Image (cartoon, rainbow, N blue to C red):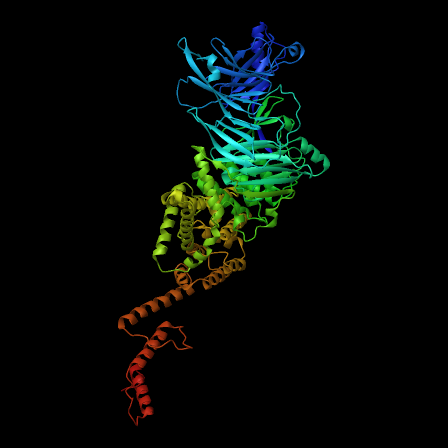
C-alpha cells in the first residue's frame, strides 16, 4: 500500500562511523565492542541527535547532518549516563540534556532526584548549569527561529515537565576570546525563565513551524496552540474545545519531543492517541484522536478539520472478540501525507482520509482486511510518526532498529485498485474505493505526466463505464480542479472536483462504506488569532462558514444547459452574443499559444459555432459564480482564472486524444474517408464517443474540430445505416468541414450516393445549398441551376417593384422555376390591374376568348395576320 524509501539507518549512517572513532580511541585497527547507539531527538533542520556508550565507559552525544551525511561529536560525559531527552541550539553552541538518574544499587541509598536537567556549553570550556533536579520526567527543546541575523547572542529553551507545566529559558550569550560564544551569566539563568503553560495533560511540539500544542482541562478540554515568532515573542493563537473522555492520559503525554529509552514505568494503557497536523501550503489544521469503545467491537476516531470548520467522527467495525481486545491494546497510527491523513490499524483497516474534499466518504480511500499492511518489517507499536516540513509525505521511525522511512502512497497500488473490480489483494475494493483511488491519483499525484498517461490508458481500456460514476467526467473535473487549485487556494470550495455532485441522486454505493459510519458536526467553535499563517487560516474558516450557509456554493456545470439551448437557436447577432464571442476569443487565443507545437490531432483548426457559444457561455457563468462567492479575488483575477480554466479544459481533452492517438499508433491515414476503419480506429472512435457523452452530461464545451474528427471516425467505423441513426438521435453533429470532405473524398458509387442523399435530406436548407457546391453530381448541378435562376428572377422581380398580393396557390408545382415564377408574376399583375370589363354590360365573353387565342397563334407564327 505504501511506498517506503529509507532515508536514515542508524547502523549504516552512524554506528559504522562510531566504530571507527572508537577504534582510534582504543588505538586498534577495528573496534569489536558494542556501542549501544540510540536516537535521542530530531531537530527541525533534520539533524539527528544520538548517544552511544563507548569503550572508555563514557556516554557520548553526536549529531548526524542529514544534508551533508556527516557525523559530529558534540559532547562526552566522563561516565555512563542515561540520556532521556536532548536538544541542540541552532548555532550548535549549547546542548540541553535530561538525565534519568540511576536509582538502583548503591545510588538507591542516596537522596537523588529521578531526573537531572543540564545546560552545557559545547565549547570552549564545557561550562555546565543545572536547570532542574526533579522526580518527574523533563523534556528539553531549543527554539530554532530564523531571525535572519548573522550573529545571534541569545538562545531560547523550552523545558516541559511531567508535572504539567512548560518553562521558557532565555539564555543570553557573549563572545569569548573574540570568536567563541558562551553563556553570559550562567548563574542568573533562573532569572530569565518564563512560565508559559500551566496544567497540561498532553503536549506536542512542531519544530518546523515553532508551535507548541497542549491540552488543558477546566470545565472542558481545550486544545491550545502557542506560536513562537522570530522576535522571541509568543502568543496563544488557537483555542479549540474537544469532547474527550475523562482522564484520557494517566501521565503527561509528550509528542514529537524526542525519544526516551529509559522511561520504563509501565502505566495503564492510555484511552486515546492524539496528533495535530498542520500544512502551510494548504493553510490547514487537523486534530486527530482515537478512542476504542468498550461495549462494542468497533473503533472510533475523530478528525477535527479546523480549516473546514467541522469535525468528522468515524466508527469502524473490527469484528470478533479477539479483534476487539487487540484494538484495546493498540491505537491507530495517524500519518500526515499532504492534505491526506492516513489512519492505520494493523490487520484491520487503512483509511486514507481526504481533508480537502471531506464532504463524502467516497473521496477518502478505505481498505480493510488482513492484507492491509504498511510495508514495514516491525510492530506498529515501535513506529513513531515524524512531522515532515511540508507534509508532502509522512516519515516513519522504527525506534527499535533506528531506521527512518519516507512513506508515500503507492501509485502502482492505486492503479491496481482501478484495474480490477475485485482484486484478491484488495478484497474490500468497490465503487467508493475506485473513486477515491482515481481522485488520489489525479489530484494528489496528478503532476506526474507518466502517471497521467497510465490513467488515460486505463480510461481507454476500460470501455464499459462504472454504474456509480463516469470515469471520464471524474478525470476532467478532478484534473481541472488540481490545475486551478495550484493557481489559487481560494477556489477550493467553489470549483467542481467531482461529477457526483451533479447527479440528481447520488448512488447509495457511494454514500456508504460497509463497516464504516461517519457523523459530521459543523461549527467547531475554534478561536483563532495571530499573524501570517493564522490570519490566512482565520479568513479560510470564515469563508467556509459563509459557504456552508449559502445554497450551491460549488459551481455546477450542468446549470447552464437551459441558457445554452436558448443561445444555440439565436442566429441574429446581439450585444450578448458579441460578449459571448469575446469570451471565446480570449480562451482560444490562450489555447493557440499552448498548442503551437501540437499538430498530431487536427483540433482548433476550424470554426464551430455551437462550441464557440458554449465556450463563451461557460466563461461567463463561471466568472459570475466566482465574483458572487469570492469577491476578494477581484474581477481581473477572477476573469484570468476563468479563462485559464476553460482553456485548460479544451487543452485537457486535446491531451487525452493525443495520448490515445499515440497509444494506437494512428497516423494521417486515419482521417482518410475512403478506407474502412481498423480495430485501432474503432477503439479511438469509441473513446471519443465516451468523451462526448461525458462532456454532454456536464454541459462542457469541446475543442473546435472535435465533432468533425468524431464524424470522420464514425463514417469509417459504423455501417451507413447506423451512422445515420447516430445523426438522427443527435449523437453526431455534422459540420461543414466534415460534409465538404465527405462530398469530395467519397466517389459516387451507389452506396456512397445513397449515403450522401440521406445526409443531404437531414441538413437545414442554408447548409444544404452550400454543400451542393462541393459535390460534383448532376443532382447538385440541377439544384445549383434552380437556385441560380431563383436568385436572378428575385433580383429582377425586386427591381421591377412588383409586390406580391397573393399567397402561393395550393397545388402549385415549382418544378420548373422560370415557368412557375412567370405564372406567379402574371397572377399578381392580373390581381393588381383594373378589370376593363368591370361595370360594363352586354360583353360577349366567347368573342373575347376567340380573339385572344387568334392573336396568340399569330404571334407564335402559326397563322398569318
Q: Could you tell me which residue is drawn at 43 percent across and 39 percent down?
A: 487
**Residue 860 appears at what percent x and percent y?**
31, 81
Q: Specify the quadrant that holds the N terminus.
A: top right
Q: Is residue 838 above or below residue 199?
A: below
**Residue 532 appears at what percent x and percent y?**
43, 32
From the viewer's perspective, tell me whether residue 848 is left or right of residue 766: left
* Name of the residue lying farthest toward the top: 27
Residue 739 is drawn in which quadrant? Answer: bottom left
From the viewer's perspective, tell me whether residue 322 is left or right of residue 235: right
Q: Could you tell me which residue is drawn at 46 percent across and 41 percent down?
A: 542
Please say whether residue 92 is visible from this viewpoint.
Answer: no
* Name of the residue lying farthest toward the right: 321
Q: Nearer the viewer, residue 130 or 1?
A: 130
Q: Nearer the viewer, residue 220 or 755?
A: 220
**Residue 408 appears at what percent x and percent y?**
56, 32
Residue 384 is drawn in which quadrant? Answer: top right
Please say whether residue 609 is visible from this viewpoint.
Answer: yes
Q: Nearer the viewer, residue 30 or 137?
A: 137
Amino acid at each position: 500500500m505504501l511506498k517506503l524509501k529509507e532515508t536514515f539507518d542508524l547502523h549504516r549512517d552512524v554506528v559504522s562511523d562510531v566504530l571507527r572513532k572508537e577504534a582510534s580511541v582504543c588505538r586498534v585497527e577495528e573496534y569489536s565492542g558494542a556501542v549501544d547507539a540510540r536516537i535521542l531527538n530530531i531537530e527541525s533542520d533534520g539533524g539527528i541527535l544520538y548517544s552511544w556508550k563507548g569503550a572508555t565507559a563514557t556516554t557520548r552525544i553526536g549529531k548526524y547532518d542529514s544534508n551533508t551525511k556527516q557525523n559530529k561529536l558534540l559532547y562526552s560525559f566522563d561516565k555512563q549516563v542515561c540520556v532521556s531527552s536532548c536538544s541542540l541550539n541552532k548555532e550548535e553552541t549549547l546542548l540541553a540534556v535530561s538525565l534519568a538518574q540511576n536509582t538502583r544499587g548503591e545510588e538507591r541509598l542516596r537522596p537523588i532526584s529521578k531526573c537531572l536537567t543540564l545546560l552545557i556549553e559545547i565549547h570552549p570550556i564545557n561550562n555546565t548549569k543545572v536547570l532542574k533536579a526533579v522526580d518527574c520526567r523533563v523534556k528539553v527543546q531549543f527554539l530554532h527561529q530564523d531571525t535572519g541575523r548573522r550573529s545571534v547572542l541569545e538562545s531560547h529553551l523550552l523545558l516541559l515537565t511531567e508535572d504539567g507545566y512548560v518553562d521558557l529559558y532565555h539564555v543570553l550569550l557573549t563572545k569569548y576570546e573574540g570568536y567563541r560564544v558562551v553563556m553570559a551569566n550562567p548563574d542568573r539563568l533562573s532569572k530569565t525563565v518564563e512560565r508559559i503553560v500551566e496544567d497540561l495533560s498532553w503536549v506536542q511540539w512542531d519544530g518546523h513551524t515553532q508551535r507548541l500544542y497542549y491540552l488543558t482541562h477546566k470545565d472542558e478540554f481545550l486544545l491550545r496552540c502557542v506560536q513562537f515568532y522570530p522576535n522571541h515573542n509568543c502568543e496563544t493563537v488557537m483555542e479549540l474545545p474537544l469532547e474527550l473522555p475523562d482522564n484520557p492520559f494517566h501521565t503527561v503525554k509528550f509528542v514529537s519531543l524526542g525519544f526516551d529509552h529509559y522511561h520504563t514505568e509501565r502505566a495503564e494503557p492510555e484511552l486515546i492517541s492524539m496528533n495535530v497536523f498542520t500544512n502551510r501550503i494548504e493553510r490547514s489544521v487537523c486534530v486527530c484522536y482515537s478512542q476504542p469503545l468498550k461495549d462494542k467491537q468497533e473503533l472510533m476516531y475523530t478528525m477535527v478539520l479546523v480549516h473546514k470548520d467541522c469535525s468528522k467522527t468515524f466508527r469502524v467495525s473490527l469484528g470478533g472478540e479477539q479483534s476487539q481486545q487487540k484494538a484495546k491494546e493498540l491505537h491507530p497510527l495517524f500519518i500526515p501525507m499532504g492534505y491526506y491523513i492516513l489512519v492505520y490499524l494493523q490487520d484491520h483497516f487503512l483509511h486514507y482520509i481526504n481533508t480537502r474534499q471531506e464532504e463524502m466518504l467516497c473521496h477518502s480511500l478505505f481498505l480493510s482486511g488482513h492484507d492491509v499492511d504498511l510495508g514495514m518489517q516491525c510492530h506498529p507499536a515501535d513506529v513513531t510518526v515524524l512531522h515532515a516540513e511540508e507534509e508532502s509525505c509522512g516519515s516513519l521511525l522504527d525506534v527499535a532498529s533506528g531506521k527512518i522511512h519516507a512513506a508515500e502512497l503507492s501509485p502502482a497500488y492505486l492503479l491496481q485498485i482501478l484495474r480490477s473490480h475485485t482484486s484478491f489483494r484488495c478484497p474490500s475494493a468497490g465503487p467508493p474505493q475506485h473513486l477515491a483511488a482515481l481522485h488520489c491519483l489525479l489530484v494528489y499525484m496528478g503532476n506526474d505526466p507518466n502517471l497521467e498517461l497510465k490513467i488515460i490508458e486505463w480510461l481507454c481500456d476500460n470501455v464499459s463505464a462504472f454504474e456509480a460514476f463516469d470515469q471520464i467526467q471524474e478525470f476532467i473535473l478532478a484534473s481541472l480542479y488540481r490545475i486551478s487549485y495550484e493557481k489559487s487556494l481560494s477556489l477550493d470550495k467553489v470549483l467542481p472536483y467531482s461529477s457526483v455532485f451533479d447527479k440528481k441522486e447520488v448512488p447509495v454505493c457511494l454514500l456508504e462504506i460497509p463497516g464504516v459510519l461517519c457523523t459530521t458536526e459543523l461549527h467547531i467553535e475554534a478561536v483563532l488569532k495571530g499573524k501570517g499563517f493564522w490570519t490566512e487560516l482565520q479568513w479560510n474558516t470564515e469563508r467556509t462558514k459563509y459557504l456552508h450557509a449559502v445554497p450551491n456554493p460549488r459551481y455546477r456545470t450542468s446549470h447552464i444547459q437551459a441558457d445554452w439551448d436558448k443561445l444555440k437557436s439565436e442566429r441574429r447577432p446581439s450585444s450578448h452574443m458579441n460578449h459571448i464571442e469575446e469570451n471565446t476569443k480570449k480562451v482560444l487565443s490562450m489555447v493557440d499559444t499552448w498548442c503551437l507545437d501540437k499538430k498530431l490531432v487536427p483540433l482548433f483548426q476550424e470554426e464551430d459555432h455551437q462550441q464557440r457559444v458554449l465556450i463563451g457561455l461557460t466563461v461567463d457563468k463561471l466568472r459570475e459564480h466566482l465574483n458572487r462567492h469570492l469577491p476578494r479575488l477581484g474581477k481581473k483575477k477572477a476573469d484570468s482564472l476563468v479563462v485559464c480554466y476553460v482553456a485548460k479544459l479544451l487543452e485537457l481533452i486535446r491531451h487525452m486524444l493525443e495520448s490515445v492517438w499515440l497509444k494506437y499508433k494512428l497516423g494521417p491515414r486515419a482521417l482518410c474517408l475512403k478506407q474502412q476503419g481498423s480495430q485501432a480506429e474503432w477503439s479511438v472512435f469509441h473513446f471519443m464517443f465516451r468523451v462526448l457523452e461525458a462532456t454532454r452530461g456536464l454541459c462542457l464545451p469541446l475543442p473546435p474540430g472535435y465533432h468533425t474528427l468524431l464524424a470522420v471516425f464514425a463514417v469509417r467505423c459504423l455501417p451507413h445505416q447506423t451512422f445515420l441513426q447516430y445523426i438522427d438521435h443527435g449523437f453526431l453533429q455534422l459540420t461543414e468541414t466534415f460534409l465538404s470532405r465527405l462530398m469530395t473524398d467519397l466517389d459516387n458509387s451507389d452506396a456512397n450516393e445513397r449515403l450522401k442523399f440521406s445526409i443531404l435530406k437531414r441538413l437545414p436548407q442554408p447548409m444544404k445549398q452550400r454543400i451542393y457546391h462541393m459535390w460534383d453530381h448532376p443532382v447538385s448541378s440541377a439544384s445549383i441551376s434552380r437556385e441560380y435562376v431563383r436568385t436572378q428572377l428575385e433580383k429582377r422581380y425586386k427591381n421591377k417593384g412588383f409586390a406580391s398580393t397573393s399567397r402561393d396557390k395550393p397545388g402549385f408545382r415549382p418544378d420548373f422555376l422560370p415557368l412557375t415564377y412567370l405564372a406567379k408574376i402574371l397572377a399578381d399583375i392580373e390581381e393588381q390591374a383594373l378589370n376593363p370589363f368591370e361595370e360594363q354590360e352586354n360583353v360577349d365573353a366567347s368573342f373575347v376568348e376567340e380573339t385572344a387565342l387568334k392573336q396568340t397563334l399569330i404571334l407564335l407564327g402559326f397563322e398569318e395576320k
